[in-house]
Amino acid sequence: MWPVRAMDRFNQGEQRMVMWGAIWGAILGYFANRHDDGFGLILGALLGAFAGRTLRNAVRAEARAETLKTLAERAATTSVSHVVPVSPPPVAAAAPRPAVSEHEPEPEARPDTSQPDFTDTVPAPLPAREAVQDMPALAPTAQPDWASHIVGQARDWLLGGNTIVRMGVLVLFVGLAFLAKYAIDNAMLPPELRLAAIGMAGIALFVFGWRLHGRQPERTGYALTLQGAGVGVLYLTVFAAFRLYQFLPAGAAFVVLGLVCAFSTAIALLQNAMPMAFIGFAGAFAAPILVSTGQGDHVGLFSYYLLLGVAITAVAWMRAWRALNLLGFLATFGVATLWGVLKYQPEHLATTEPFLLAFFALYLLASLLYATRHGLEPRQAVDATLIFGLPLAAFGLQVGLVRDVEYASAFSSLALGALYLALGWWAVKRRDAGVGQWLAECFAALGLGFVTLAVPLALDERWTSAVWAAEGAAVYWMGQRQGRWLARLAGLVLQVLAALSYLRSFDQVQTALWPLANPAFIGALLLAASALAIANWSRAASAGRTGESLFAQQFAALEQGLSPVLFWVGFLWWQFALGHEIGRKTFTPDGYWTPVLGHALQSYLQMLAWVASAWVAHRWALPERSRPWSVAATPAWFSLPIMVVVALQGVVELRHVFEAWGFVVWPLVVVLHVFTLRRLDGMAPQGWWAWVHSGGVWLLVLLAGNLLVWGVQQAHLQGTAWASVIFLVASVLVLLALTRRSLYESDSAARQRWPLDRFAQAYLWRAAVPLVLVVALGAMLVAVHSNGHAQPLPYLPLLNPTDICVALALGTLALWWNRVRDSDLDVPQGIHNARWAVVLSGMAFIALNTVWLRAVHHYADVPWVAHQLFASFLVQAGYSILWTLLALGLMLFAHRRDARPVWMGGAALLGLTVAKLFLVDLSNRGGSERIVAFIAVGALMLVVGYFAPIPPAVQPEDTDMNEEAA
């Protein structure tokens, strides 16, 4: 198949060779100096076209030779690989070969064991030449591009029928135009004689063609060509007499032109000869350009073209000659566009606007007559080029004309949209359902398009986005109701354009005097509402129906996954609208802009906006609804993280929860979150909801600490021990609430109620473990760093904020550990290990040491600096006595309980104390602290030896007996 495709590519490119050869030849000829510009242009084009055609023939011959060679080789290979033992076919006519699709695999790609397509006959491989002759039947017809189409149409006209005559007419017409121009430039003959000669030549051509048509009907094409050339020459003559020499007044000239136009049209209609009418009108449109000097009046030119337009519209009433309609449209608006670019000035508006409106009305009427009067098929009757090209061209010219008039472009677009919507309504009401439906759809699309375009031309980007968003939602809804995928796609595209238009407006500071009633809020609101509406409608999107186009099926498949995305787009636009309104700014009397709300209140309101919106949205996701919308529950997934972020922001900024209406916002947010959580935590994703329950405990710690910060600020206790224990107290209080005995009993009433009925593990273990770590670390940090200043209260050992909080923290840790060990929670086995008691004991030992440090700091005036405290012999002597008392207590306890490991720990501490006496305290020469330390430690050691000797070791037999008794 690839040689066939190669020939296809050569065939598609051969016309481009001729066309580009003509173009470059014309350019080179134009710049040649040996002839005038017109002659060089035409000669260069002809030579270039000839060179392109020659090159095309050479390439085609080379490609054909290569194709023959390749097919011969493949034919030989195929003949060998397809030999199978079958009886020879009868001498009947061979069955025709089936057409091979371009997408089927090539013959050589099949395995050698494959069987032939037909079981009754096995045709022999075709020879190479027959295969080449069969190529057009095998290759699918390729759709040419627009350039190839235009070249092909011109070639068909020129080479179809009597080619010599048609080329001769073209050459003669151009020659007469050049003759007139040459005679004018050189003043060879009087103007009257020149015009008379040209006019007589035109009349002679027409009369000869008319008589030839009557006498020799078989030469109709030749005769019509001559008649058309004669009419074109008459147009040229009358227009030159009016425009160049002013031999005819304006009224008389246009009467004559009208008569010539009417005469040529009548002749074409009489003979039913569209080519003759086309030639006549083509010459009429070309006449002003060929004889133009650049100094004429545009009113005369447009009046002349208006007369031609009226004639074309009259023909459209009687004949369905599409080419004539397109000729008038392209020539009129092409010349008008060229004149507007080169000559138009704002003062020409009054003399050009009426012509533009008249041209538009004429060709709109021509397109309607073509579609409705001649009984054509709907697809053929609706001329898309004229239906869509006319309003676009007319509106482009209108914008150029009124570019200096404020809002004129917007009102022009709005009027054009209203006109086409009215035409669409008229088309719907027609009895002809086929053509009427096609026209209604085209006019509705144009009407909506121009109404849409009017918005950005009149309003700013935010209002534009609002209108486009609403319009896009309406178009999508209509497309869904009618089952039209293209309309739904247009609705989505409008949503994207609306969003881009809205975002473009944020390159400046957004200010608004009125709350809610401002373009920023309304634009974002309509964007949100439109996206959410389309998200809801697209839930009902189904797969493409059988019989629909490939694009329709692919778009339907895309829509099925589009609803969640559009929901989030709409929800975020809604949050953006609320956030922008919360952060709205206004101008001060001095001309500066300032936020309406404070920073803290903005944070709280933005948090409330999200949580409240999630609470509203989650109701569409509940299972009891007829069509639950699961994606509507997803905003609630992020409510807790947002609340935690705002709480952390308050902690960092030292902002308490009661500040800036926080005492109203926070309770409302928490209540909404709890209600939403209770309705959704039974749905997916279960793992995430467990973390949300745990995160609620951590949020409670932040809020409690924030409240304590506010209390400290109100009491002006910054810089005291009260401020240093704030978050330790908050964590301890929350952890203490989680150590209630009933929470760890599976049959208790608390465990049977929400949320512990399903999330006990999340609260009592997952949420508590981070709190335990925070409390443990916080207790040690507070114990080591807090100096115990309790202003305005005096310092008392063990009765100051630091010592009380540290003791409460250690007690809470021990209580939680015991609760978890005795519960039925699914916890790691390592939590039951006794080493955690050793860890708690070590933390308590550190805390007791810091109690002595604070006492020395307050009563002995030792600075609260680490190296100075360590260098104090009073501190060291106190440590020695304290450690000995602790060792005594441990050993007495162990002796009474026969707890030998505990006694060994006390003994180790006592040995450490003795070592410290000789390594540290002994260096205090002459100090009373050393004497006291040694005497006190020695006396206490005697007490230990007398009252708490080492417990006896447990014998293996006793162990076995105890185990059996147990």
Image (cartoon, rainbow, N blue to C red):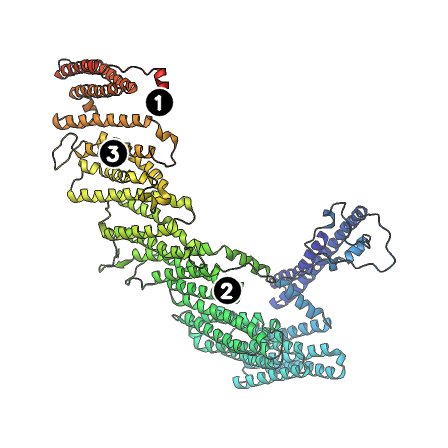
Residue 240 percent location from the top left of the image: 57, 79
Front in this rendered view, residue 508 or 469: 469
Front in this rendered view, residue 949 or 4: 949
Q: In the current view of this chain or complex, which residue is farthest to the right?
A: 91
CA distance separating discs 3 and 2: 64 Å
Name which residue type carries label 2: Gln
Drawn side of residue 438 relative to residue 619, left or right:
right
What residue did someone put label 1 on? 965
Give the residue drawn at x 39%, y 59%: 528
Drawn side of residue 60 relative to residue 527, left or right:
right
Give the residue drawn at x 30%, y 59%: 511
Rendered position, 910 above or below 229: above
CA distance separating discs 2 and 1: 82 Å
Front in this rendered view, residue 439 or 18: 439
Name which residue type carries label 3: Ala
Rendered position, 605 above or below 789: below
- Residue 740 in which image quadrant: top left
What residue did someone put label 3 on? 809
